[in-house]
Image (cartoon, grey):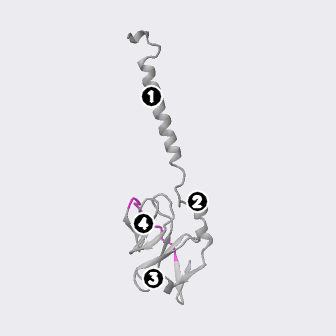
Amino acid sequence: MDLEQSPVSRRSVLLGAGVAAVAATAACSTYGDEPASGQTSAAEDAGTDAAAGQPLAAVADIPVGGGRIFPDQKVVVTQPAAGEVLAFSAICTHQGCTVAAVQDGTINCPCHGSRFNLDGTVANGPAARPLESRAVTVENGEITLA
């Protein structure tokens, strides 16, 4: 077959394939912007500020060597050692999912498997940054968001 007499040139085929590849890449990157199940928006994250001053729990309700998640306030409170109370945002620093459990000494994100130590530092990625600290006060055995 003579290529010069072909109605479609080789250049046209390659150009068409390149355009299709760019379109597919654009479609995938747009799809990737959708929140994964369990992710929150900035408007939802703002709910943490509105909860300031709100009592969360008694220190006795937070297990030593563990923690508890407060989904309405988007906060996780841990007690790494007896009497040491720490609080963090419950929003994973990887892609914004809400952490789902505190088990076996780690705070666990269900979306991509990130795990955080009870002090908020990264125990296992893909998250690269620690959980954001939240200020709490402890008075008369009661934990309150500051």
Q: Does 113 appear above or below 11?
A: below
Q: CA distance from mark 2 to mark 1?
A: 39 Å
First reached walking from the N terminus: tag 1 or tag 4: 1
Q: CA distance from mark 1 to mark 4?
A: 43 Å
**Which residue in the structure is indicated by mark 1?**
17
Which numbered marker is on residue 42?
2
**Which residue in the structure is indicated by mark 4?**
130
The residue depicted at 45 percent of the width and 65 percent of the height is 109
Image marks 2 and 4: residues in contact by CB distance under 8 Å: no
Q: Position of residue 50 (x, y in %)?
A: 63, 71
The residue type indicated by label 1 comes to Ala
Q: Dot 4 surroundings within 10 Å: few (below 14), some, or many (20 or more)? A: some
Which numbered marker is on residue 124?
none
Q: Main secondary structure of the magenta part?
A: loop
| Quarter of the image that includes the C terminus | bottom right
Local SS, label 2: helix
First reached walking from the N terminus: tag 4 or tag 3: 3
Q: Dot 1 surroundings within 10 Å: few (below 14), some, or many (20 or more)? A: few
The residue depicted at 46 percent of the width and 60 percent of the height is 111
The residue depicted at 44 percent of the width and 86 percent of the height is 83
Local SS, label 4: loop
For the record, the magenta segment spans 125-135
First reached walking from the N terminus: tag 1 or tag 3: 1
Q: Position of residue 11 (x, y in %)?
A: 42, 20
Q: Nearer the viewer, mark 2 or mark 1?
A: 1
The residue type indicated by label 3 comes to Pro
First reached walking from the N terminus: tag 3 or tag 2: 2
Q: CA distance from mark 3 to mark 2?
A: 30 Å
Whether 128 is among the magenta residues is yes
**Which residue in the structure is indicated by mark 3?**
63
Q: CA distance from mark 4 to mark 3?
A: 21 Å
